[in-house]
Amino acid sequence: MRTVGPPRPLKYLIFIPVSGILSLFIFYYIFKKLFPTQFPVFTSFSNIPVPSTMITIIYVDLFFVFLLLPYAIYSRKYSNYMLELKRQARSFLEIYPSVAASLPSVSQAILASVELVEPPLKDYLAAFGSLYKMTGDLEGSFLKIFSSSPRDVRLLLTSILTTARSGGRASDILNVTSRYAAELQRMEFYLKNRLQSYSSVIILGIAVYGFAVGMTIVMLEVLKKNATFGLTGVMTATINIPGILGIFFYSLLIVSATSGYIIAKVISDFAPRTSEYFIYLILIGTFTMIVALSLASHVVI
């Protein structure tokens, strides 16, 4: 009997400390060689150590990326595996009634259905049909094989168990379940498309935030060089621009982590994918920050 189930986390999670340490040392030496006078630079802002240059911020970003990358890959594979299993389970229930009606036993119907579906559901059904054929325990075989599947997949496929105990009404039960599965799939597709548009708004918001941070830093630099520029009587020469840049970067990390969790929980329905979206968001935010700094720094007042 083949082993079925979602991707195992160990082979991915074991690389988290390894990738984190390697990224720390590798990028430290790379940046130290490329920018010997700028990296690493931290400053104190209200007794909080913060990165005070864009080179340091980029280094911190890359450290987070390589630290979280193994877990992000695992969570994405796991989430996609479960989503595909749900989709295939609903599609399977549309064809199973006709297969079951043409064969005398449940085990034969299940094994015959194996060739009509693709992995990962194919692996589940093959293992389920083989175990039931060997043991004769339909319910026990189902629970053992599908224990690692999503709850809604188990609820849909329990119609197989129900039909085995229903006698002459098996086709009616399967047809009702099939129509329900098809309608559920259409509703979920519509809902996911709507939610994807909301995630685009969040991503755009992070990009705008990063751009606004870059513009703000440039404006503070202008004010610091022109002590009375638009601020009569206000001392701007003491503005801690590197510290403000670092605090803005910390706020970007917090906003990215929060937004990543919302996208992962609402869109993917799998909170661990927060790490994946966090990587995307901090890179987008930092990139737009760099773009704003590069564009605005050429403005001469």
Image: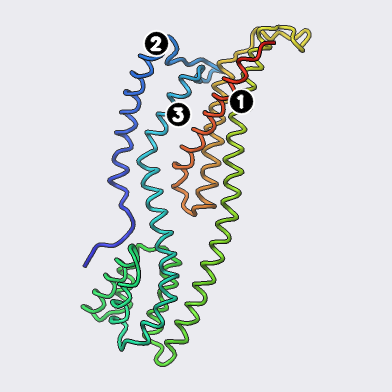
Q: Position of residue 133 (x, y in %)?
A: 23, 79
Q: Residues within 10 Å of mark 1 (few under 14, many from 20)?
A: many
Q: Residue at x 34, y 62 (%)?
A: 120
The quarter of the picture where residue 132 lies is bottom left
Query: Are circles 2 and 1 on residues that touch, CB within 8 Å?
Result: no
In the visual, does 258 lie left or right of 273?
Answer: right
- Please report whichever mark, 3 or 2, sits nearer to the chain's N-terminal start: 2
Q: Position of residue 263 (x, y in %)?
A: 53, 47
Q: Amino acid at mark 1?
A: Val
> Mark 2 and mark 1: span between their CA atoms?
26 Å
Above-or-below relation of 196 to 157: above
> Mark 3 and mark 2: span between their CA atoms?
19 Å
- The residue to which callout 3 is attached is 61
- Please report whichever mark, 3 or 1, sits nearer to the chain's N-terminal start: 3
Above-or-below relation of 38 to 122: above
Q: Amino acid at mark 2?
A: Pro
What numbered label is drawn on residue 36? Answer: 2
- Callout 1: SS: helix
- The residue to which callout 1 is attached is 213
